[in-house]
Image (cartoon, helix red, strand yellow):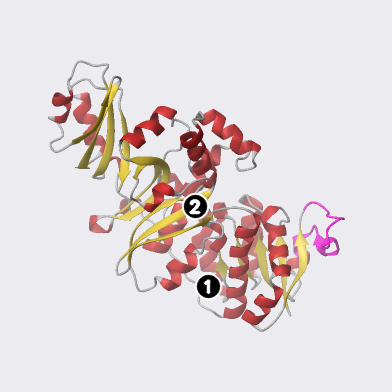
Amino acid sequence: MKNIAILGFGTVGSGVADVLAASCNKICREIHDTVNVKYILDLRDFPESKYADRVVHDFDIILNDPEIELVCETMGGTKVAFDYTLRALNAGKSVVTSNKEVVAAYGKLLCDVAREKGVRYLYEASVGGGIPIIRTMKTSLGANEIYGIDGILNGTTNYILTHMKEDGASFEEALAQAQKNGYAELNPKADVEGDDACRKICILAALAFGAMIPQSLVSCEGISSVTLDTIERAEKFGGSIKLIASARRMKGEKVDISVAPCVVAHDNPLSGVSDVFNAIMLHAQHLGDVMMYGKGAGKLPTASAVLSDIIEAIKAGKGSEQETWNIADPGMLSDNDKVSDTYCVYVPTSFAASEEKVLALFGKAEIKFSEGSGFGFIVENISRSKIRKNLHSIDVKDFSVFRYVK
């Protein structure tokens, strides 16, 4: 029997216990043994739960029990979760987690400690909920260099944008509906301002490029400024507005990493990802483009990913190899504002310059639509800073620019 402890008995923690009970026969076949939840650490008691007799309030009980081989951290937050994770690893216990905040902030250190102690630190559920993206990158795509990642990594923002597009709701109305349905927190900042997606793309970039990029160095923009006009104009450009988390290897081994609303072309599979679903498109050396799609959050999908890590850690046993990475040098990062790409540009007609005068500045720019309030064009192989410089040179100041994801 393999004894484990669950830290935090909220949505994900209780889901882990439920999935473990529901899938006990399958898990037993996988590991040729049984898994027993010996302890559940939480500040609360759960007298109505069938696990009530396993609830403890002192982490040292878990830490000092030699029968506990693995700790499942589903607490959320950073300070206490990081402290307990570090102490568990140093005590020779493997740790699996769904906590993207801790992985993004301290993943390099925790992987190093796990490697030193001969145990595992696994974090499949930290990105994409139930989508097995991390294990896929580490194993199935092990023979491929990953050149780029474009992902819809936050279900809340994707739900809001879908609701705005399909129902004509304003951002505020769509956010209120997301909160009513339990998709958004009372304080939705981490979701709508892009912080959650930013943590996740940092984790995926570490796997792809071997270096953890601090969140503070990432160009990050959320969706709070997206309006119904933005949604409608994206359609005229031939795409849909999506919050895209992106990490790409550029020339000279530099990495461009960002989170921002983008116009995703309708023939790109990411364009059709709706509601609370997540999707990650990988651009791989030999395989080409491959996309993984599924539920990016929720009790059972996330718990399923946690259990997959529990199975892997148990099967690997102590002394197994733990991957790790470096901390990215700031010089490794491209200046996102100066990266040449394809952009959708909307220019209002509230200035004296004509369409011809604007297009003369951009060479082969293609007009996509013209309306009473302005016009939109797509321009390739140019940077945001160059677009701004060109338009400012003819006194155009009130314009919008979105990366075009083909």
In the image, taking residue 399 as reference, residue 3 lies left or right, namely: right
Majority SS type along the magenta span: loop
Residue 82 pos. (x, y %): 61, 56
The disc labelled 2 sits on which kind of residue?
Answer: Asn
**Front-most of residues 171 and 3:** 171
For the N terminus, the quadrant is bottom right
Between marks 1 and 2, how big is the CA–CA gap? 31 Å
Q: Is residue 142 above or below residue 98?
A: below
- Residue 278 is labelled as 2
Which residue: 18% across, 19% down? 353
Q: Nearer the viewer, mark 1 or mark 2?
A: 2
Which residue: 82% across, 64% down? 54
Q: Is residue 189 above or below residue 61?
A: above
The disc labelled 1 sits on which kind of residue?
Answer: Arg
Q: Magenta residues, as a range? A: 43-60
Give the residue at the far bottom of this rendering. Answer: 32
Residue 65 pos. (x, y %): 76, 72
In the image, taking residue 154 as reference, residue 388 lies left or right, namely: left
Which SS class for mark 1?
Answer: helix
**Front-most of residues 103 and 66:** 103
Residue 57 pos. (x, y %): 80, 57
Which residue: 48% across, 32% down? 224
Q: Residues within 10 Å of mark 2 (few under 14, many from 20)?
A: many
Q: Residues within 10 Å of mark 1 (few under 14, many from 20)?
A: some
| Residue 245 visible from this viewpoint | no
Which SS class for mark 2?
Answer: strand
Q: Are marks 1 and 2 in contact (CB under 8 Å)?
A: no
In the image, taking residue 187 as reference, residue 221 lies left or right, namely: left
For mark 1, what is the residue?
Answer: 115
In the image, taking residue 287 as reference, residue 214 lies left or right, namely: right
* Sooner in the amino-acid sequence: mark 1 or mark 2: 1
